[in-house]
Amino acid sequence: MSRRAYSEINLHITWHVKDNAAVLRDEIEVQLHRYLRRRAAEEPDVICREVGGTDDHVHLVVSAQPTLLISEWVGQMKGASAHYVNKLIANRKVLEWQPGYGVVSFGTKDLPWVVDYVLNQRAHHSGGKTHVRLERIEPDDEGKPAQAGSVQ
């Protein structure tokens, strides 16, 4: 595929800690988010817009080129970030990601509110004002992607 293609591909990606363990706290969270930003910046097909999350999951907002293989890239991000936390921060196994992830595409006009949503994850979760589409990591019970939904 030509690298000279026009595209506006904006993605919101999320994944969870295994068993939703609350290990992404304090310095681990700060360093993990910094690492995810740096790692995303190394990918020529990605512009990292924001990283956020809570104690048990992360959210990334990126703009991507059509050449990005999303599942492969997310797998690399998950594996590398767990290795980084376990080997270089904690010096022991404290972080393991659960299988899967959620990815939602959105239009460029929605970029500001999606970035704001990711920046304010703790407030959204503590206030019960999460957006179902941006929190899902599994299809619905019938195996289909989640339907566009309202605030939960």
Image (cartoon, rainbow, N blue to C red):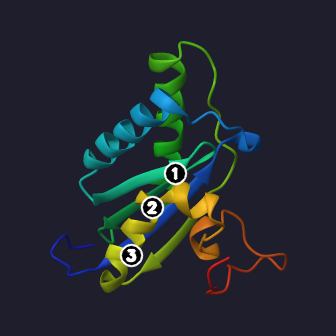
Q: 53 or 148: which is nearer to us?
A: 53
Judging by the rendered image, the residue that carries numbered circle 2 is 118
Name the image quarter holding residue 93. top right
Q: Residue furthest left?
A: 4
Give coordinates of residue 33: x percent, y percent: 41, 41
Give coordinates of residue 140: x percent, y percent: 77, 76
Amino acid on which the number 3 mark rests in the picture: Trp
Above or below residue 20? Residue 110 is: below
Give coordinates of residue 7: x percent, y percent: 26, 80
Above or below residue 73? Residue 65 is: below
Quick one: quadrant of the N terminus? bottom left
> Residue visible at 60% across and 42% down?
55
Q: Earlier in the sequence, mark 3 or mark 1?
A: 1
Q: SS class of the residue under badge 1?
A: strand
**CB under 8 Å between discs 1 and 2:** yes
Judging by the rendered image, the residue that carries numbered circle 1 is 53
Q: CA distance from mark 1 to mark 2?
A: 7 Å
Q: SS class of the residue under badge 2?
A: helix
Q: SS class of the residue under badge 3?
A: helix
Quick one: quadrant of the C terminus? bottom right
Tag of residue 113: 3
Q: Earlier in the sequence, mark 2 or mark 3?
A: 3
Q: 120 or 59: which is nearer to us?
A: 120
Q: CA distance from mark 2 to mark 3?
A: 9 Å
Q: Is residue 68 in view from this perspective?
A: no
> Residue visible at 47% across and 43% down?
76
